[in-house]
Image: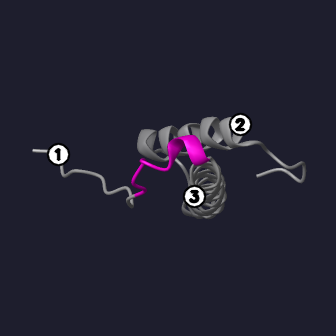
Amino acid sequence: MTEKQLDFEEALARLEEVVKELEDGGLSLEKSLELFEEGVKLVKFCKLELDQAERKIEIVLKKDEDYNYVEIVPFTAEEED
């Protein structure tokens, strides 16, 4: 990841590039580890951004009287068959 702060979409796009480079192979061990480290940082950044967005949505729903019928439940990904 470069010094400039990426937004979510840029970070996700870069993560996809990193994964593709690693999957394609042919990299030195040093380059593979460098890309892996960058990927881990990007994943952490994206997760933080998603967590913050989720909290903002929950706050909006809780504050809006018109939507008091909405039940806020934690998201759980269904397992793929």
Mark 1 sits on what residue? 80
Pick the front one: 43 or 56: 56
- Calculate the distance from the C-alpha at mark 1 to the C-alpha at mark 2: 27 Å
- Calculate the distance from the C-alpha at mark 1 to the C-alpha at mark 3: 21 Å
Residue for point 57% across, 49% down: 61
The picture places residue 72, in percent across and down from the top left corner, at 43, 56
Q: Which residues are magenta?
A: 65-72
Mark 2 sits on what residue? 10
Q: Quadrant of residue 13?
A: top right
For the stretch drawn in magenta, the main secondary structure is loop
Mark 3 sits on what residue? 47
Q: Are marks 1 and 2 in contact (CB under 8 Å)?
A: no
Q: In this rendering, which labeled residue sits more in front, label 1 or label 2? A: 1
Is 41 positioned to the left or the right of 72 in the image? Answer: right
Amino acid at pointer 2: Glu
Q: Are marks 2 and 3 in contact (CB under 8 Å)?
A: no
> What's the coloring here?
one colour
Q: In this rendering, which labeled residue sits more in front, label 2 or label 3? A: 3
The picture places residue 56, in percent across and down from the top left corner, at 66, 53
Residue for point 62% across, 53% down: 46
Q: Quadrant of residue 81?
A: top left
Could you tell which of marks 1 and 3 lies nearer the N-terminus?
3
* Residue 16 disc label: none
Above or below: residue 39 compared with residue 24: below
Q: Secondary structure at mark 1?
A: loop
Above or below: residue 39 compared with residue 16: below
- Calculate the distance from the C-alpha at mark 2 to the C-alpha at mark 3: 14 Å
Q: Secondary structure at mark 2?
A: helix
Residue for point 59% across, 59% down: 51
Above or below: residue 26 compared with residue 40: above
